Image (spheres, coloured by chain):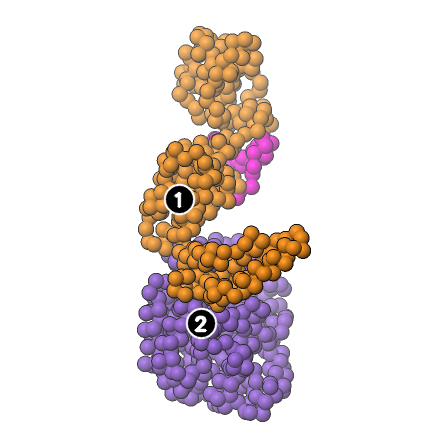
Amino acid sequence: MASDFGEAEAPEPRFVPLADIDPGDERFRISTRRESGDLLASIRRFGLRVPPLLTPARSGFIIVSGFRRVSACRQLGWDSTAARVLPTASEYACALMAVAENSLERPLNLIETSRALNLLEQTVPEGQTTDPDASALGLPTHPNVTGRLKRVCRLPSDIQDGILEDTISFAMACELDRLDDDLGVTFACLFRRLKPSLNKQREIVSLVLEIAVRENIHPRQVLEECGLTPSMGRSEPDRNQEIHVLRRRLRQRRFPALVAAEHNFLALRQRLRLSGGFQLTPPRDFEGTGFTLSLNFQTVEEVVRLRGKLDELINHPDFKILLTGKGRGFETPSDS
Amino acid sequence: MNIAELFVDVQLAGRPEAEAASRRFNVPIRTVASAQLVYASVASLEDPIGRGKHVLYLTRNRGAFIKSCPGTRHYTCCGYKILHIGTFCSMDCSYCILQSYFHPPVLQYFMNQDEMDQELGQLFATQLIHRVGTGEFTDSLIWEPWTGLSARLIRTFSGQNGCVLELKTKTAWIDPLLDLPHRRRTILAWSLNTDEVIRTEERGTTSLDERLKAAARGAAHGYPLAFHFDPIVITNGCEGDYRRTVERLFAAVAPRHIVWISLGALRFMPELKAVIQRRFKRSRIVYGEFIGGLDGKMRYFKPLRMKAYREIANAIREYAPEVCIYLCMEDDEVWEHALGFHPAQRGGLARMLDDAAIRQCHLTAQAAEGLR
């Protein structure tokens, strides 16, 4: 990196007409922030403390670092601005400066990291590796990570926005990246609205995809049929409740026999009219055969009362049904 | 078997079997001091499992040749003995547990068979009934064309009266075995499935018809037979497909030749799911209604298993009411529901199978008494 920076030693600031700076060339842009309102106020009050970094182009200049500063100066109505102009720097040297002015000043977000890695890769001279420079700039270098990271800034904007909002994690972005664009975007919009945890996002994606395979339909159809659309229930104020409903619908469709068994068990347990001191739990997923009966009490009198209730439970016909299979959901309670 | 790389344990270099393998597969021998070097040759590849099916490692079995089947306390195990002759398989079934059982998997064949013979001798000397099989960590017959191991084992087992060898396969390579003096101490066994499952999930295996024709040839040469409906893949309407498979089985083979028929629904360690999704993109078998079993494996929701077992068992009983049917790794509740009894009522599953072996394979009562 030293040699490339050496090629572009820190230039002295000079005044450059703003009209000579190409606002449309963003090849060196790293920052995802675009609005410059705060910067505008700061420059107006304290002046431009750090001039932007430019490099000469065929006509005029292009920005290497300081896109928001140049934009703020324009909004302030300035004709020219102080700028540092890199003399005849290679594209790679400019790229290194662009990344350095961001990554050495503040932590980069995922998309900025992705842009930085791509920029270095696209501009590095043939036969040279970016790894030592990337490492010095605080960027990851492990190929497993960089391979996935580099894709992030090419993801659809809805997914990128979800990442910037901290709604969509890197892991989920990678999963959405594997889906058709439209499908990934649909999930991204849904997650941005409901903000479920990563585990719940994974569960929703997995259930939708697996239902689609089981039923030989497109995942989009599953989303629509389960009411899982980005705009669903906009009036619903309780996101957690909405997430709960979505997961329940999906699970019911993915595991119909299991969910039916759970419903049957609950219906039968309700018929037992257990008092507050009892809790009856079936074996997990009805795979084992052992039920759990918990008794809650504080006093001897309560135990005596529960003993009477326990005798009633033992003699209840539905309790026997429950223990012999039918109540475990293998047949509906009405069959019994 | 199509071998692209042949590794030989340095301690076995120069053995004629290694030279024979090299000639047969037309590949040079690479002598290695450790299995890690063999694993390293496939581990970094994109599909190490697929590649491992073309990498043969001739080595020593450093553990026991005879192992007990690793059952769990939650489900009833048949008490089988595994004869550990080698690992992995040249065929490519989507659901194969061996894909995630060995890390990474390669075809290993054990050449220290003098030690295997010693262990078998000790087993025979117990004078107890033992059911022994080579088809747990590999297919029993994939090695046969170039090793003749099964032929040798058939001869070995024919010389005693207490143990029975089960050769379990999805191939039809039994012809060299037909005329051997087996004395009914070897059971030829096939894994059976529906045409659809064989076509979509069992790459490189023989068709159902070929398996059944091979079974019929075995029966004609006096071999006792066994069949394993395992894994049963549960889908909507699968019971009809399995019923038709049962019909074809009994159209090919008379019940009197059959020692036992097992039923086992698809089950797999959770980590296998990702392997299947990666390696068999068109497979749908992992999208069934699976729950976490008590042994940590993914299993179909219990009532689904019960229904499938009951339907298939009933179909079998229509043709072969006397044949021993058993469930592989299920609990008493499933047994009761599917078969109408549970093993303890008949002395336990091991006893049921031993009795079937005594009847069909003519094991001596003296050996059977030793067990009881």
Q: Residue at x 49, y 10 (%)?
A: A81
* Label 1 sits on residue: A179
Camera-side mark, 2 or 1: 2
User: In which image quadrant can residue B62 be found?
Assistant: bottom right
Look at the image and give the residue range highlighted in magenta: A119-144
Sort mark 1 into few (<14), some (14-19) or many (20+) by Cα contacts within 10 Å. Answer: few
Is circle 2 on the same chain as circle 1? no
Residue toward you, B196 or A247? A247
Q: Position of residue A75 (x, y in %)?
A: 44, 12
Sort mark 2 into few (<14), some (14-19) or many (20+) by Cα contacts within 10 Å. Answer: some
* Label 2 sits on residue: B337
Q: For this view, does B352 lie left or right of residue A305? A: left
Quarter of the image that includes the C terminus of chain A: bottom left
Q: Colour of chain B?
A: purple
Task: Please give the letter of the chain rendered in orange.
Answer: A
Q: Chain of mark 1?
A: A
Q: Is residue B41 magenta?
A: no
SS at circle 1: loop
Residue toward you, B14 or B108? B108
Residue toward you, B225 or A210? A210
Q: Is residue A130 magenta?
A: yes
Q: Residue at x 57, y 55 (%)?
A: A278
Q: Position of residue B321 (x, y in %)?
A: 39, 83
